[in-house]
Image: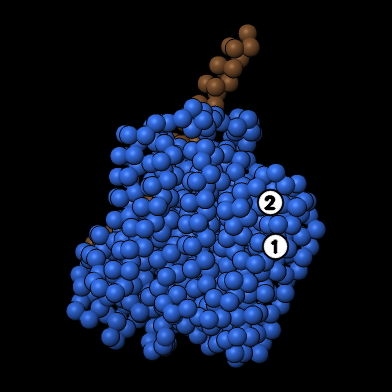
Amino acid sequence: MVYLVGILIGILIFILVGLVLSKRIANVEDYYVSGRNAPTVLITGSLVASFLSSVTFMGEAGFSYDGYPIIQLILVIFNASGYVFGVFLFGRFLRRSNALTVPEYFGKRFNSKKIQRAAGITTIIGISAYIVAVTMGGALLFSSVSGFSYTVSLIIIWFAYTSFTFLSGAKGVLVNDTLMFFIFLFATVVALPFILNVTGGWPNAIIEAASTPGKEGILDWHGIVGENAYFSTPAEALVWAVVLGLVWGTIVSVSPWQTSRYLMAKSEHVVIRSGIIGMISIMVIYLILHISMTTVNNINPNITPSENVFIWTAINVMPTWLGILILLGIMSAVLSSCSTFLQLIGNSVSNDIFINKKNSDMSLLRFSRIVMLLSSIVILIFTFWQPPAVMWIGYFAATLFAASWGPVAFASIFSKKINKEAAFWSIIVGFAAVFVCEIIQKFWFSFPIYFHPVIIGVVLSTLILFVGSKFGEVTEEERLFQQQLWKAPDDLADPKEMNITKRYPNILIFGGALVIVLTFILYYIPLNLL
Amino acid sequence: MGNLIFSFAFGGSLIIIGFFAKYMISRMAKVESADKKDSRKEVI
């Protein structure tokens, strides 16, 4: 009961924040991109909160508990690097376009409404599947904690994220995402010493976890390998981590739910600083989460389903206040992803599908709000219905963007030769290739990991881009817009701001040194030297 | 051996990306100051 009250109070606060901020929405720019004046803390909070979801704190935590913590951390190295590569190679240029949505950027870059619509439709299809899957996961989680039925839990979850997203748009999403980011960051970091303490203390917790009966090798870099394990050999585990890490790194660099945050940044300095802090935050959260979840094997190696390991720990092992915070943190991760996804769907429907710039600002704002509400109702109906295989669709829907948008996004900045036809077909073919390959995998046979559907999609999408650019012509509008993207905004030259930005890479360098020490003490010394 | 490499690689990746970010920012700053000089010349 006390856990339920804690979560409900948290949800009430998020709704109130949305209500208060809705009064500050004066025009479409406020609603779509928070007036383009968000500081580093809000952009970082929203980047990380919209990336992490129940998949992180349940699915991936369970995978660590089952036997694969370190190989997941190897994946995170490539995945999190996408934040820094993304801001330097795409995000900061995206912001210079002054678009309201990422599909609008593609439309402006290639002077083509057709491309804007194509990118908008891929956003709506891909993210709708993802939001239905995450909402269902959130409703099931809420139901298991509260004892309420699935339907009641679903309505509570849906109402929470719809209310503040509908009312306050990007402003509410940014502030709530940041609040939620701090809740789960605090919960994960503070949980570590408590979990280590009850699982045997340092270094015993690590030593004992490494030799869990039936899970020998759990803390080796490759995790449990062998005939009945998830991976047959260490090499297979490494290839899996590198390939999926690169796929997710590309998603972080170009996907709409990450890069759209840069459109809300106050300046290009904020974009760069947020990417840097985003990377280090993700790496620290994952390091602590995966190591601590592995040690739970010392007190209960039989939690089923294993994805409940963090929830089980919160309820059975932690002090009540920390248990509430952890459960609220997991729920926050669900709500923050859903609110960002809903915002993107609503924005894309009203801005990229029904492109209409002739209306007045107020009527556009009203139209955007109505579309947001209608989109959310459609999502609710789908989630009620619980479409079969939605979890599977949701999982691969996120990866669609790496193939569909990745090659076009980077080429739109660095290539003077690509044209609208090549870009259009590259988006379509990348999307279709992943979709078809995933269907083949689901119903017929599996591809080896190095032929992951996303890799096939990226190769085909790049090929189309290359061939299309050879034959088509670049128009004057496309050439001028690409040139314009390389013109630095005035605020970038501010020496005071530049000096602050120049210090940020030092956070990565010193943070990296600290993480090496932490990894060495927490993991390597107990496992190999004691 | 693999465990030792991981212990250094996880934090090490932050250091490498940190140097990459340093390089990119200093390049941006250089381009900026060159642009400024150019625009000053144009004014003169």
- Chain on which label 1 sits: A
The answer to whether the residue labelled 2 contacts the one labelled 1, judged by CB atoms less than 8 Å apart, is: no
Foreground of the two, A68 or A317: A68
Image quadrant assignment for residue A179: bottom right
Specify whether A22 is left or right of A404.
Answer: right
- Chain on which label 2 sits: A
Screen quadrant of the N terminus of chain A: bottom right
Screen quadrant of the C terminus of chain A: bottom left
As drawn, the label of residue A34 is 2
The percent coordinates of residue A352 (x first, y second) are 57, 51
Q: Which chain is brown?
A: B
Vertical comparison of A107 with A320: above or below: above
Residue drawn 40% across the image and 52% down it: A428
As drawn, the label of residue A370 is 1
The percent coordinates of residue A106 (x first, y second) are 50, 44
Vertical comparison of A59 with A375: above or below: below
Q: How many marks?
A: 2
